[in-house]
Amino acid sequence: MKVSEPPAREAAALHAKHVLTPWVAQGARNPPVVVRGEGSYLYDDRGKRYIDFSAGLVAVNLGHGHAAVAAAIGEQARTLAYAAPTFAHDRRAELARAIIELSPWSDGGRVFFTTGGGEANEDAMKFARVLTGRHKLLTAYRSFHGSAPGAGTLSGENRRWPNEPGIPGVVRFFAPFPYRSPFHTRDAGEELERAIDHLETVMNYEGAANVAALLIEPVVGSNGVILYPDGYLARVRELCDRHGILLIFDEVMTGFGRTGEAFAAQRFGVTPDMFTFAKGVTSAYVPLGGVAVREDLAQRFDRTPLPSGHTFSGHPVAMAAGVATLQAYREERVFERARDLEPQLSEGLNALQQRHRVIGEVRGVGAFFGIELVADRETRTPLVPWQGSSSLQPFFNDLLARGLYVLGRYNVAIVAPPLTISSEQLGEGFAILDAALGELQASP
Ligand SMILES: Cc1ncc(COP(=O)(O)O)c(C=O)c1O
């Protein structure tokens, strides 16, 4: 029987009736029904246009509707949609090579493919345990690494709580956050020193020899686009080296050009032993993630069986999408475009901060920015508390009504558009933000 496509309005009703939406209470929602995407724009069933100012969930780095990526997906689906991952496959080999060529490693490496970022972190954690024979894992508070029990436990925030008690062996530390210092500093240099002292103390109390890996987002993403003080990641690298702890970067948000380099590892000049990725690897056109492993570590799996597997590991359609996406990044110089966007985003958002006292801080790198909304600039009191029960959803809904989609969590708005966005489109987005922030400021 042919399944007929529901008319879009009907889709809204069917959505409300049958679809469970991630992370939100399901009642009283009325999201637009999106039907099409083109470049930096999304369109709904009424023809209304939205600028996608957060590239979906910081993922659609190429922009929507890229013809070559769509064609590669279709072509692969027709040629070979699936074969067991124990077969070799041309696109899988090609994509793994391309990712390793983009990696910070000069001595090569290998890639294990998953279907998303959380799953990649689950596998990276398992690899680290098998490779080191140690069981503890260090992760930061105010981090997100995925939703399923393992990656959820690795996460340092309230989306972890439904997983608790979670998996054993995960120990959390405070990473530096100059604007809201967990160490009560107001100076980035002092913040760095105290954060390193703290991390070293945690390692000592846990017994560094028990720690398999330290997993960290090189720029904190959905927990507020937090940049560490210069030198922090390098000092973390030193500590890990001193104690034989593997350093894993979660590059799920930062990977594939978001920071203006292929990976944040290059942007900050710090080389991890493994990194996980997802989102931008296919510009989100199909689900794909993975773990990249430094060659000398990967070689250990020549003798020891790899302790992970998934039906969809290296799915040919996802591989074809990845190969086409990486080719487009190269040919269209997309990572360079992210670097060009950095001053434009910084200037545009700082100009908004000048006009609106509700913006406490603008921070970011490449095309990855956050604005912190505060009730008081002096005290830095957040407009709604982080992980509190109140929400700025009316503000984000207002932006949407004005034609701008922005991903928000608590008092932080994440501005991370497709890396292909034009200056005019950025300007349009800033104008909408300006109007909505004015309303927000005026509201009691
Ligand atoms: C840094 C980071 N790691 C992991 C994940 C989880 O990825 P996924 O949703 O593909 O499982 C996310 C999702 O946003 C993320 O931002």
Image (cartoon, rainbow, N blue to C red):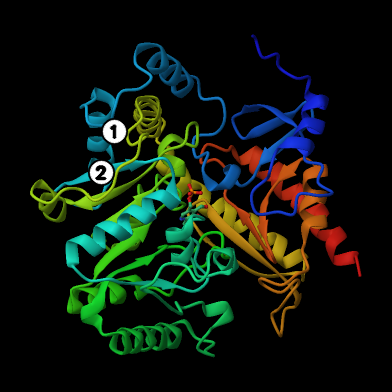
**Amino acid type at mark 1:** Leu
One can see residue 75 in this view: yes
With respect to residue 237, does 308 lie above or below? above
**Amino acid type at mark 2:** Val
- Answer with left or right where residue 107 lies relative to residue 268: left
In terms of image quadrants, where is residue 37? top right
- Answer with left or right where residue 266 lies relative to residue 260: left
Q: Which mark is residue 42?
A: none
One can see residue 260 in this view: no
Q: Which residue is mark 1?
A: 95
Foreground residue among 8 and 129: 129
In terms of image quadrants, where is residue 230? bottom left
Foreground residue among 333 and 203: 203
Kindly identify the residue that appears in the image at 55 percent across and 40 percent down. Answer: 418
Foreground residue among 130 and 277: 130
Q: Nearer the viewer, mark 1 or mark 2?
A: 2
Residue 320 in percent (x, y) is at 36, 25
Q: Which residue is mark 2?
A: 111
User: Which quadrant does the C terminus fall into?
Assistant: bottom right
- Badge 1 vs badge 2, beta-carbon distance below 8 Å: yes
- Answer with left or right where residue 407 lies relative to residue 95: right
